[in-house]
Image: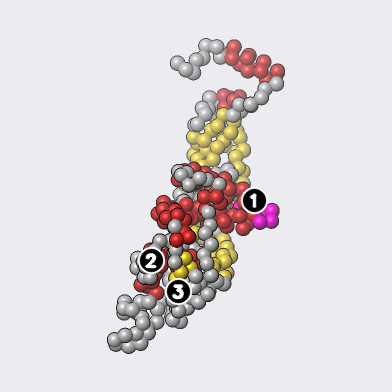
Amino acid sequence: MSVKYKDYYETLGVSRDSSADEIKRAFRKLAQKFHPDMNKEAGAEDRFKEINEAYEVLGDADKRRRYDALGANWKAGQDFRAPPGFEGHENVHFGGDMGGGFSSGGINDFFESLFGSRGRQSSGASGFEEMFRGASGHSGFGGMGGGARTMRGQDVESELAVTLEEVFHGGSRRVSLQMPNGGTKTIEVKIPKGITDGKTIRLKGQGGPSPSGGESGDLLLKLRIMPHREYGVDNHQLTKELRLRPDEAALGGRFDVKVMEGDVTVRVHEGAQNGQKMRLKGKGLPTGKGDARGDLILTIQVVIPRELDESQKEAFKSLGEALQDFNPRE
């Protein structure tokens, strides 16, 4: 089976010379648009998976560099005969001239393509070396001192996008994994309450199978919190805008604010300034330590209507006359 080249730049709608920030912005926009919790249209979930797969590569500087190199030489590759246990993947192509041998980078890319998750050896050895290494650290092909040894399966790394609500409440998610034989395996992944963005959880025995019937490797899942339409996330702290009219900011008052568990009322003092911040203690994400939670930081955003009717214009003119002795530019 040949590995089909995917244009991740096209998936995210960016050019190949886009900056990391441009790629991140494109990902967030598309992820929010096609997230299954927000988009119930047919095909949205598949599109969401494609977007996450593309960003997993292009959002990582090292993976992006290797992807760019692979893409440039895709059609120049040579056929690779799969090792025992990976039949059905005989015609996997690698970029560049391998000269009949194996480079550690090429073999790693082969295992990455098989697992569909950028699988990687936790020991730092190449996939080829680890696959045929016995329990004593030597080759498992037999030779002096005995026959073939049992080999542990490969650890697999992947990322899982979770919603802010899943992080706040905790829960579980069913995840489908692509296996080396081309099949899929569905497992239940527990999402710890209050887990932070980028945290990795290890699922023992859920990685690659042993090519010799030994112990399976582990699955290392890095959790990524999806962008939210209302909140920003900084560790266990949440951020949010409190949007006020000019008169509300000037006169102050009490305003209802939506937080993760419902609504709270906050008091804004008169003369509130655009960009002014307010801290709501314990209204952020759980910290994982008992009932403790981070804080919610509100940033005041004074909003002026883009279009005014005549009465509103007159009201602002009257306000301007009343404030003619006040010059904010001095």
Asked if residue 188 shows in the view, the reply is no
The residue that mark 3 highlights is 81
Classify 10 Å Cα crowding around label 3: few (below 14), some (14-19), many (20 and above). some
Outermost residue toward the left in this view: 144
Element type at mark 3? loop
Asked if residue 244 shows in the view, the reply is yes
The residue that mark 2 highlights is 98
**Residue occupying image coordinates x 54% and y 40%:** 240
Quadrant for the C terminus, please.
top left
Classify 10 Å Cα crowding around label 1: few (below 14), some (14-19), many (20 and above). few
x%, y% of residue 144? 29, 86
Residue 329 bears which disc, if any? none
Q: Is residue 146 above or below residue 68?
A: below
Identify the main secondary structure in magenta: loop
Q: CA distance from mark 3 to mark 2?
A: 13 Å
**Residue occupying image coordinates x 47% and y 65%:** 93
Element type at mark 2? loop
